[in-house]
Amino acid sequence: MKLPAHVKLVDVGPRDGLQNEKQPVPAAIKIELVHRLQDAGLKNIEVTSFVSPKWVPQMADNTEVMAGIRRQPDVCYSVLTPNLQGFEASLDSQPDEIVVFGSASEAFSQRNINCSIAESIERFRPVVEAARARGIHVRGAMSCTVGCPYEGEIAPERVEMLARLMKGIGVQHVGVADTIGVGTPLRVQRALEATLRHFDIDDISGHFHDTYGQALANTLASLEMGVWQFDTSVAGLGGCPYAKGATGNVASEDVVYLLHGLGIATGIDLDKLIDAGQFISDFLGRKSGSRAGTALFNKRASS
Ligand code: HMG
Ligand code: MG
């Protein structure tokens, strides 16, 4: 088993983590969270999304949040843009990377972005073209690559098709998402293999929600295939408004603990990351969703 020597984590907490929060989270708190993540050594942060505020009210402060960040030149700040309207709205914020998001499941595509998979690709096409013309990196998120809340199991062929369509319009990197966290290692590996038919190993990442407690196992199964990029969420925040019952992404703290235990470098200071997780959990008034974060925090408090 040859594991990667270095792993890149994209903390999606400010976006995926907070998009589903019912209570208002002020822009100042989101900005502080981004600052704490970058202070902890995160070099990739998914900050917000430029989607309809009627669909996802929590992300309505996208421009304010982006404007409030003290940007570091070596940090990549990403935002979600589902269509040209969102892309154009994001431009004043100067994102380093934009994310178009499609689905391997027709039903989820309809519920999440109100169009078919084929229509979504046609919406993404001009976004990808405009972004790349400006030198903005383009990532594609592929939802429901193992299971869908409406269609159930998703076959790897569906993932292969979506990856091919994404590649065809010039998407540079794709994230293989287990949106509802139902995947187990072999099924996740099948989805990754399907994606690898169109994207190089250096251009794919894993995005695993932890609903069934499988996300760390799925991360390790991905590492064993050579995947070295993952989306994770501080304090395990998150969920998607159109994937009811799904919990947050795998906690960043848990993945960092796993990786450091395996001798894999991340450049992340776990103590500072735990503090960032405590900060947002305290604000939200609940316990952190990170097992390692909670254990290490309690150990620190008792020593
Ligand atoms: P639509 O209703 O089909 O869009 O929504 P439309 O073009 O027909 O326009 C209707 C209205 O929306 C108009 O406003 C537009 O101006 C407005 P009105 O005239 O009615 O006042 N509109 C917009 N407003 C702001 N920003 C925009 C925008 N576009 C249109 N970009 C749309 C289509 C995609 C916009 C809508 O379905 C939407 O916003 N969906 C939100 C989806 C979302 O954010 N989901 C969560 C993120 S994805 C996720 O979490 C999964 C991921 O983590 C990976 C995984 O885990 O699977 C990435
Ligand atoms: Mg997600």
Image (cartoon, helix red, strand yellow):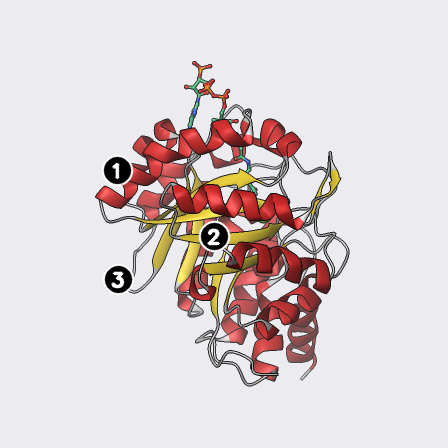
SS at mark 3?
loop
Comparing 118 with 60, the one in front is: 118
Q: Quadrant of the C terminus?
A: bottom right
Closer to the chain start, of discs 2 and 1, is: 1
Residue 47's mark? none
Closer to the chain start, of discs 3 and 2, is: 3
Q: Residue at 56% of width from left, 27% of height from top?
A: 116
For badge 2, the amino acid type reads Val
Q: Position of residue 41 (x, y in %)?
A: 42, 70
For badge 3, the amino acid type reads Pro
SS at mark 1?
helix
Name which quarter of the figure residue 72 lies in: bottom left
Pointer 1 residue: 92
Work out how far the residue at label 3 is from the one at label 2, CA to CA, in angstroms. 24 Å
Q: Residue at 59% of width from left, 32% of height from top?
A: 109
Residue found at the very far left of the displayed protein:
134
Pointer 2 residue: 174
Work out how far the residue at label 2 is from the one at label 1, CA to CA, in angstroms. 25 Å
Residue 73's mark? 3
Work out how far the residue at label 3 is from the one at label 1, CA to CA, in angstroms. 17 Å
Left or right of 69 in this view: 180? right
For badge 1, the amino acid type reads Asp
Foreground disc of the pair 2, 1: 2
- Give the answer, above or below, for where 151 lies relative to 4: above
Q: Quadrant of the N terminus?
A: bottom right
- Give the answer, above or below, for where 96 lies relative to 114: below
